[in-house]
Image: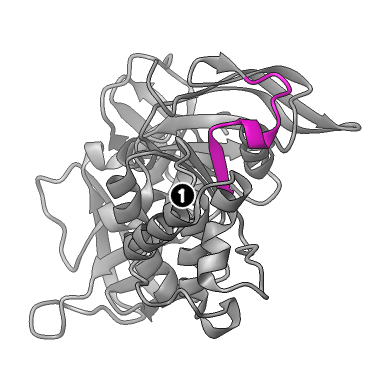
Amino acid sequence: MTIGQITLTSVTKQFGDTVAVDDVSLQIEGGEFFSLLGPSGCGKTTTLRIIGGFEYPTTGEVSINGELMAETPPYRRPVNTVFQNYALFPHKTVTQNIAFGLQMKKATKAEISDAVERALDLIQLPGYGDRKPSELSGGERQRVALARALINEPTILLLDEPLSALDLKLRKQMQLELKALQRKVGITFVYVTHDQGEALALSDRIAVMSDGRILQVGTPSEIYDSPQGRFVADFIGTSNFLEGTLISQNEITLATEPPLKIVSTPNNSMPIDTPVTLALRPERLDLRTTPISDVANCLRGVIQDESYLGTLLQYTIQTDYPTPLIVHQQNTGTRDGHRFQRGDTVYLQWTPENAIVLKTDEH
């Protein structure tokens, strides 16, 4: 059995009449950085608490390292947790906070001193041992919380939105540090977040949750490039959705007036005349003043709005399709790139492989 492996089998958790986790089955491999991703109230934190032993499933089983946890309490599981609010003792020093777990285990002073020094080096805070939490920045407090959780050498670390209280720039920095830390210690990280970009940047695999259920599990590229339903395509990044009908294995008519025929990737899993939804990522659409003749799909439109987003230029375009479409272009500067203006007539094109075809009733 791989150390750090977690298996959930048909886990359901009810609070009265509310089903917080609904028949979740999942396997997390040892040494993975695994994220539970979804909107508030989707059941991701409850799932994390069930793994940690802070909640017990109403039905179903949890195994860690091949052993059924049943009603095993948190302190008897090879798991530690980092909470959103850090949960540091304000009256204790950094050293005392980090050492707390080892003190509870009755480790010797020499063992504690050596372990704390190693932990401070690991989180890149050597020399900070005598400071109080109030003397640290938010990012430094989060590192101390990580060190305190890691000092007992768990095989699994659970992290409940640990970066959500940080400002954007610090959060991006801490994401890099957290990923590097996980690779260095080599244990399983199970990470709860509602931030799609954070999950994509950090994870080996992601489980997307909604209404207590897991909708899709996959690598970041699988989740982003091949979503299995509209909810996942909409929640992960940004998508344009166009409704249509499959008229052959590789052709769709869009709901325009008159209907527009486009070419799609070959699809043998859906019968002809199936209502479909086409998901188009804004950065996968090509915007030009004149169309390229050998690109299969083209919509003529007019720029309604343009926004400067720093590294990106965002355009809102009204085409023959009723709903305006969003297009992102890399901002290459005025020397290399063309910046469109409101009112410009443009041609929006895409290749079949840059569109995702979903059944319209898939959510």
Over which residues does the magenta segment extend?
69-82
- Kind of residue at disc 1: Leu
Which residue appears at 16% of the width and 78% of the height?
338
In front of the other: 76 or 330: 76
Which residue appears at 45% of the width and 65% of the height?
143
Which residue appears at 54% of the width and 84% of the height?
135
Q: Considering the numbered disc 1 on the image, is that residue within a helix, a strand or a loop?
A: helix
In front of the other: 103 or 10: 103
What percent of the width, then of the height, locates residue 14? Answer: 82, 30
In the displayed structure image, the side of residue 276 where residue 88 appears, left or right: right
Image quarter of residue 168: bottom left
What percent of the width, then of the height, locates residue 283? Answer: 29, 57
Image quarter of residue 292: bottom left
What percent of the width, then of the height, locates residue 324? Answer: 46, 61
In front of the other: 65 or 34: 65
Q: Which residue is farthest right?
A: 16
Q: Quadrant of the C terminus?
A: top right
Q: Which residue is mark 1?
A: 150
Residue 237 seen from this side: no
In the displayed structure image, the side of residue 316 where residue 235 appears, left or right: right
